[in-house]
Image (cartoon, helix red, strand yellow):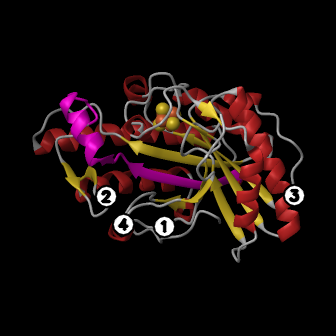
């Protein structure tokens, strides 16, 4: 299929959400990994995943982007599809690396390429030689296995994803840990104590994941850690409520960007719990690598994290 609209777009996070200065490359659209919360199900997209063939158009757009004033670029290849979903996706990743390899030389720029996945297809990725000004960030989405089984039906299990980190590091990729989306599940009830206990249980599960990550990765390769609770558009929220989805937590509020999220104290409690666990396993300095993606400045402040951009 040929892409008619833009391949490369500055990511718009939403009104008042902290901007991480990231571009999205739509190498394909749609995904069949079956996540119940996936926003792609709620916007107009092809039923089956497609990967675009008109790479000449992508090349023109990347050249326009790199010829601008900016010195460092962060390209996310996993927003409109899973970056490593099929052989065709892997082929387009190689195309993107080849194009960017020649452009970074021509314009003397630095580039990060984020490959975000819930598959184990990194083992099939054969990378071309690329310029040292290009850094590839292999990002795995992390959630407790119980939640993956419930809401991410066709994805690779979490411990398999974590085990792939060493392989990626050994192949000169940087590592990104993506604690997104954080979902409170199971919910033990709607009383204050029930909700507190649900959050406590969730944080215990995240501690296990972080401990396993720590054992299965090289800290020196760690590029970034993002943390973000689930959020829904109004349309998504309405539909999920109607379907009696377990994704819809009793206490969700409409935020300034018109998305539903858990209330501020709940989000802050979860983020602080995960940040403290990360500090316990790594060190206090880990906060330099932490992003509260798609969050507002007041949440960053509550969690004592400095806003920053992804091209670090
Ligand atoms: S892996 Fe990502 S793109 Fe694919 S269904 Fe899940 S959320 Fe959507």
State if disc 2 and disc 3 touch (CB < 8 Å): no
Label ID, residue 268 = 2
Where disc 3 sits, the SS reads helix
Left or right, 312 with respect to 261, comes to right
Q: Which residue is mark 1?
A: 19
Q: What residue is pinned by disc 3? A: 102
Identify the mark nearer the N-term, 3 or 4.
4
Residue 127: image location, x then y, percent: 82, 39
User: Where does the image place residue 252, in percent across and percent down from the top left?
Assistant: 21, 48
Cβ atoms under marks 4 and 1 closer than 8 Å: no
Does 102 sit above or below residue 155? below
Residue at position x 56%, y 67% in the image: 309
Q: Nearer the viewer, mark 3 or mark 2?
A: 3
Q: How many marks?
A: 4
Instruction: Give the mark nearer the N terminus: 1 vs 3.
Output: 1
Q: Which residue is mark 4?
A: 15
Circle 1 residues within 10 Å: few <14, some 14–19, many ≥20: many
Q: Calculate the distance from the C-alpha at mark 1 to the C-alpha at mark 3.
A: 28 Å
Q: Which residue is at the front of the view, 5 or 24?
A: 5
- Are the residues flagged by discs 3 and 4 in contact, CB closer than 8 Å? no
Determine if the C-beta at disc 3 is less than 8 A from ligand 1: no
Secondary structure, mark 2, is helix
Q: Earlier in the sequence, mark 2 or mark 1?
A: 1
Q: Is 2 colored magenta in this rendering?
A: no
Question: The N terminus lies in which quarter of the figure?
Answer: top right
Quadrant showing the C terminus: bottom right
User: Residue 53, image x and y in percent?
Assistant: 72, 37
């Amino acid at each position: 299929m040929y892409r008619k609209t833009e391949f490369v777009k500055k990511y718009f996070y939403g009104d008042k959400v902290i901007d991480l200065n990231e571009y999205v490359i739509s190498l394909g659209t749609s995904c069949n990994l079956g996540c119940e919360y996936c926003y792609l199900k709620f916007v107009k997209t092809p039923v089956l995943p497609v990967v675009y063939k008109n790479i000449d158009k992508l090349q023109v757009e990347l050249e326009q982007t790199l010829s601008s004033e900016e010195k460092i670029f962060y390209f996310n290849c996993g927003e409109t599809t899973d970056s490593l979903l099929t052989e065709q996706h892997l082929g387009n990743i190689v195309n993107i690396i080849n194009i960017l390899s020649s452009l970074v030389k021509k314009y003397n720029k630095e580039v990060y390429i984020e490959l975000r996945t819930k598959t184990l297809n990194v083992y099939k990725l054969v990378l071309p030689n690329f310029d040292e000004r290009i850094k590839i960030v292999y990002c795995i989405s992390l959630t407790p296995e119980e939640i993956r089984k419930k809401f991410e039906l066709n994805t690779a299990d979490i411990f398999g994803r974590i085990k792939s980190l060493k392989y990626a590091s050994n192949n000169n990729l940087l590592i990104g840990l993506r604690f997104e989306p954080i979902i409170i599940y199971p919910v033990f009830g709607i009383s204050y104590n029930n909700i507190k206990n649900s959050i406590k249980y969730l944080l215990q599960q995240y501690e296990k994941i972080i401990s396993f990550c720590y054992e299965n990765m090289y800290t020196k390769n760690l590029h970034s850690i993002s943390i973000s609770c689930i959020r829904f558009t109004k349309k998504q929220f309405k539909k999920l409520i109607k379907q009696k989805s377990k994704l819809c937590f009793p206490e969700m509020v409409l935020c300034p960007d018109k998305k539903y999220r858990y209330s501020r104290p709940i989000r802050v409690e979860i983020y602080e719990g995960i940040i403290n666990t990360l500090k316990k396993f790594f060190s206090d300095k880990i906060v330099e690598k932490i992003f509260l993606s798609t969050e507002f400045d007041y949440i960053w402040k509550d969690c004592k994290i400095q806003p920053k951009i992804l091209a670090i």
